[in-house]
Image (spheres, grey):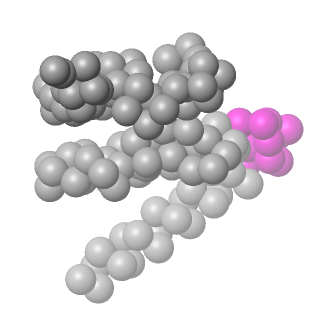
Amino acid sequence: MQNEAVAEIKKRKEDEAWVNELKKIGRGEMTETVAEIKKRKEDEAWNNELKRLGRYDLIKDRVGTLEEAPSHYNVGIEPVKYIQSHGLDFLQGSVIKYVTRYKLKGQAKEDLMKARLYIDMMLKDYEV
């Protein structure tokens, strides 16, 4: 355990030295790239662990924030914007949402089943 902590401190110092060297030679713009690459690798490792545990609901790019929508919403026009612009109700909007993104979340069959559920609810209005 202590050896791991020492190795982590050493690695951080090496990273800091690398960033400082880039700044010193006038390549400060590269430091963000180094930090971004490191962050991306950490995020990928974390996401892989969450996937291994079956916790897709906690993966950052699937959850999103107020500032940034989850990656499965990057499909041209966001489903919520389409739903609002067409004045769709909850059931109609849910169908649009699930059908639009079913291939992007890694749970295609589950999303299509959800869309079918909402369509079935809508069809009840037309039953005699």
- Please identify the quadrant where the C terminus is shown: top left
Residue 81 x, y percent position in the rendering: 61, 26
Question: Which quadrant would residue 110 be assigned to in this image?
Answer: top left
Instruction: Identify which residue is drawn at 80% across, 47% down.
Output: 23
Picture mark count:
0
Q: Is residue 16 left or right of residue 28?
A: left
Question: Which quadrant would residue 113 be assigned to in this image?
Answer: top left
* Range drawn in magenta: 21-30
Instruction: Identify which residue is drawn at 48% across, 32% down.
Output: 89
Question: Chief secondary structure of the magenta span?
Answer: helix
**Residue 58 visible (yes or no):** yes
Residue 6 x, y percent position in the rendering: 38, 78
Query: Closest to the observer: 107 or 61?
Result: 107
- Please identify the quadrant where the N terminus is shown: bottom left
Q: Is residue 111 left or right of residue 76?
A: left
The correct choice, above or below, for 76 with respect to 123 in the image is above
The correct choice, above or below, for 28 with respect to 108 in the image is below
Residue 41 x, y percent position in the rendering: 41, 44
Query: Closest to the observer: 58 or 18?
Result: 58
Query: Closest to the observer: 77 or 51?
Result: 77
Residue 4 is one of the magenta-drawn residues: no
Instruction: Identify which residue is drawn at 14% across, 55% down.
Output: 53
Question: Which quadrant would residue 55 be assigned to in this image?
Answer: bottom left
**Residue 101 visible (yes or no):** no
Instruction: Identify which residue is drawn at 73% across, 54% down.
Output: 20
Q: Residue furthest front?
A: 128
